[in-house]
Image: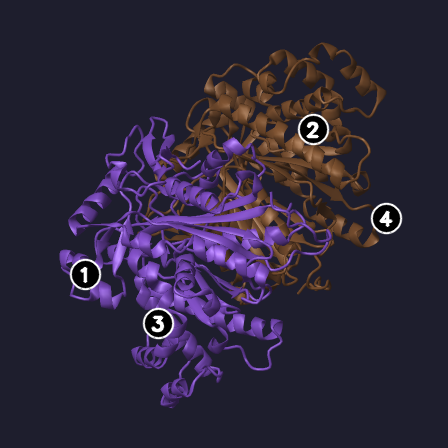
Chain colours: A purple, B brown
């Protein structure tokens, strides 16, 4: 049982943020270069054009419940936390397989042995934004008068699949769990988050008979960039005020900047877009003389405005070029998972956070500010920031190292996945489509290929009730364990 | 712009709760006695057996978006609030017509003119519990470091329809909006709410091609009562501690007790069930000598236990009889709307709160504690309480009167609905079923019969995009207004 709760009833706990993270992605992937060839797309369309290397996917024996069961069980076990110590658990997802029963209610199966059923929170949905909403709600709960000293957990997960054609290569699948509490090594900075929500039909899923969305690609990019502009403008204002800064807040004040990644190329464009925002507002965007030189020959763009430049290729090219060094230092490292798993929807942004953390040492991260931009079509978007504790803070430094240790196996897990051919990938998606919403059904894919410790679907009975098993974890001391 | 925010950054605002409420229910209803006859059910089955008088329903020109647009627009207008003054808006619903795009994103259409898009919150789902989760999140946000001094709004709405047969008479439809902020006349008491969440297949909607749920009626009652027992036990413990009470917390400490109402008879059983809980725990459950007499001849039930008595008719009858007077004083008044509109799902509990408020004067409500039990199948449940400000508190008394004034037209609006025959009701539900999930479709029901100020669906285009219009409000000063 955690014993955080020392504060007076009317005073909020401090430094609320992330104490641990866990990621799950499927064990199978398809190579994007081979997919280009298979699809008859022009060479480089998916790889150079979209910035994607590989794409993870699930067969018919995984669903949103199994993904979330897996990532939650792994988070709890790795961090040696009792289910009795969780006071809140919320799930963000847009992979809806039941219009009423939440994924959260299925996750409560894991709590049975602990006897703890006093766990607030249900599911939350708006496209890829659900994880962020769940995170904000968890942070607020810890700061609220209803907090009882226990941890909150945020789970976000999705299976992103598209009908055959242009968009299919932008799929992905995965889940992330985050442990939330006060005195965290990764603090979500209070009072600065800014939000932009508006009605749009850029990407939506009104055909409930299909797993596939309806996508208006151009409107989606326009909506993403408009939301980014608005959130950034608002964040900068709030941050200048909140942090009592003498200069205007600008990109130089984010040591790292991570974005929701529908595909990696949009992320690179987005950083360039923030540079354009700074440039048009006459903010100082560079650290170095070299950066200064990069932006110095852009004066012919002074008269541009944000709204009309969204699809202005000349502006885009110029600012992507000028911001290349900034991209390399602030953002490129965030794409390790996104480029190799694809768009996981709600977990996408948090996979970029994990990638940033695993690509740096704790001393490189010490005291750094990470900017985060979350986007969900429809649309809902927020910009917020996290601050890594300083290595001089010995109590929190140990927590930071624990957090980093927990995700340190990510790349080896990515490397240990099994590559399948584009044809096998297409077959698996056809199998998913053919069996989508079926009842009285047993998945035909065997669990042989999934990772140990993974939950998988064993049956959907005649009343649509779903049943799961867990693939045993590797033998420990000669015993096979199911991880409980 | 509200100017609440006076408190120090690390101190929470006080007395967070409800500042205003608004309810919408459809303009058409069917009489339950006529429905019994139409269905060939035994006389009294729906009326006496379930406690239902009438049932509201929607035709094909209303959907979850239109219901929520209506109730939000009416809340804002009645209370003369600017859309710029809302910092958070969350929707609780289980009426899913898009797996990705939230109802909240559609409600942002109402914010366009204000230019305010910095509005946190999306949709939240677990059966009838979504409204309560949205409320808890709104309360936490106001108490959090991210609160910016603006109001939060909670919207919950649903259209509850069942396939032909036993359960159809337990449908309903409606939406409720609640305005949330500090220094409220109706305070949600902090630190006492208790929750019970568990995995169950009592009621769920896995067939995404249909509007209808799958229901296991017996399991649903068992799940509801088990959740009630657990939430009450836990609430009593927390309340005794939080309120520094010398006696054990019991029913006598709730001046009013309201419940999620799938049908009114279950609510009466539920109050009796709380009396049984008190009785088995040897708590004092009565105010008066008469109450004492009512419970005095129940000693032969001392050896009963909660778990095995859920379907024990003898226990149920004895405690329903003994608690009749308590039901009349604490709960019966909460069923005005539920008995005449039916189960609205997420708004059901809050309709019972409104009914309690409209059936009492502000002096009868002064300083009273209202217990609330929220249940959503699957399952998620919470018990919590609200305290009405004392009439001596002049600043808040004015707010209470404003809140009460806002809902004072409820009964006249119920009375002004149009009764339709069971056959017309069955035809409307067939029309809904036949056109469910259709695109390239214009509703065939004319908006002639809906209430003024109501939004209605005008078209679902070939890309499933939905379009709405608003029926004009009555002429004011000779002008017809659309309410914006």
Label 2 and label 4 in one chain? yes
Q: To which chain does the residue with label 2 belong?
A: B
Question: Residue B118 at what x, y percent from top left?
Answer: 54, 64
Residue A269 got which mark?
Answer: 3
Marks 2 and 4, Cα distance to the nearest angstrom? 27 Å
Marks 3 and 1, Cα distance to the nearest angstrom? 22 Å
Residue B467 placement, left or right of B325? left
- Ranked by sequence position, the earlier of labels 2 and 4 is 2
Residue shown at the point (53%, 56%) measured from the top left? A399
Residue identifier under label 1: A33
Q: How many C-alpha atoms fall within 10 Å of the one at disc 1: few (<14), some, or many (≥20)? A: many
Which element carries disc 1, helix, strand or loop?
helix
Residue B240 placement, left or right of A304? right
Which element carries disc 4, helix, strand or loop?
loop
In what quadrant of the picture does the N terminus of chain A appear?
Answer: top right
Front residue of B429 and B148: B148
In what quadrant of the picture does the C terminus of chain A appear?
Answer: top left
- The total of numbered circles placed on residues is 4
Asked if residue B120 can be seen in this view, the reply is no
Q: Against A278, is B312 above or below?
A: above
Mark 2 vs 3: CB contact within 8 A: no
Q: To which chain does the residue with label 3 belong?
A: A
Residue identifier under label 4: B392
Label 3 and label 4 in one chain? no
Q: Against B474, is B309 above or below?
A: above
Which circle, 1 or 2, is nearer the viewer?
A: 1
Residue B332 got which mark?
Answer: 2
């Amino acid at each position: 049982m955690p014993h955080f709760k020392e504060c007076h009833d009317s005073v909020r706990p401090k430094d609320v943020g992330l104490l641990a993270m866990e990621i799950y992605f499927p064990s199978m992937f398809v190579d994007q270069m081979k997919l280009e060839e298979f699809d008859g797309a022009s060479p480089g369309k998916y790889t150079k054009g979209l910035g994607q290397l590989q794409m993870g996917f699930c067969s018919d024996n995984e669903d949103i419940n199994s993904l979330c069961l897996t990532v939650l069980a792994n988070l709890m076990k790795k961090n040696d936390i009792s289910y009795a110590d969780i006071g809140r658990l919320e799930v963000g997802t847009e992979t809806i397989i039941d219009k009423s029963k939440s994924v959260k209610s299925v996750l409560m199966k894991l709590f049975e042995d602990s006897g703890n059923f006093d766990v607030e929170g249900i599911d939350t949905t708006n496209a890829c934004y659900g994880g962020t909403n769940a995170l904000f709600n968890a942070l607020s709960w810890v700061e609220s008068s209803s907090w009882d000293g226990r941890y909150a957990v945020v789970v976000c997960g999705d299976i992103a699949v598209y009908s055959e054609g242009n968009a299919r290569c932008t799929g992905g699948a995965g889940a992330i769990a985050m442990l939330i509490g006060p005195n965290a090594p990764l603090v979500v900075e209070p009072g600065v988050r800014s939000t932009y929500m508006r009605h749009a039909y850029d990407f939506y899923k009104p055909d409930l008979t299909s797993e596939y969305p309806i996508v208006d690609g151009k409107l989606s990019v326009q909506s993403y960039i408009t939301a980014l502009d608005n959130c950034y403008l608002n964040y900068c204002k709030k941050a200048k005020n909140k942090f009592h800064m003498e200069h205007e807040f600008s990109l130089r004040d984010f040591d790292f900047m991570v974005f929701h990644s529908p595909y990696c190329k949009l992320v690179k464009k987005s950083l360039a877009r923030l540079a354009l925002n700074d440039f048009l507002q006459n903010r100082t965007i560079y650290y170095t003389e070299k950066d200064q030189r990069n932006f110095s020959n852009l004066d012919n763009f002074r008269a541009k405005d944000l709204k009309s430049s969204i699809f202005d290729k000349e502006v885009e090219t110029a600012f992507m070029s000028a911001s290349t060094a900034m991209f390399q230092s602030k953002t490129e490292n965030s794409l390790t998972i996104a480029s190799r798993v694809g768009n996981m929807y709600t977990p996408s942004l948090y996979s970029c956070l994990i990638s940033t953390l695993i690509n740096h040492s704790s001393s490189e991260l010490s005291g750094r500010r990470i900017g985060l931009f979350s986007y969900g079509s429809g649309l809902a978007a927020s910009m917020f920031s996290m601050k890594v504790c300083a290595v001089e803070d010995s109590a929190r430094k140990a927590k930071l190292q624990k957090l980093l240790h927990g995700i340190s196996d990510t790349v080896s897990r990515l490397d240990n996945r099994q590559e399948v051919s584009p044809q096998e990938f297409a077959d698996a998606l056809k199998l998913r489509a053919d069996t989508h919403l079926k009842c009285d059904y047993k998945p035909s894919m065997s669990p042989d290929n999934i990772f140990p410790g993974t939950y998988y679907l064993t049956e959907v009975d005649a009343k649509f009730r779903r049943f799961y098993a867990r693939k045993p974890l590797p033998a420990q001391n000669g015993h096979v364990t199911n991880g409980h």
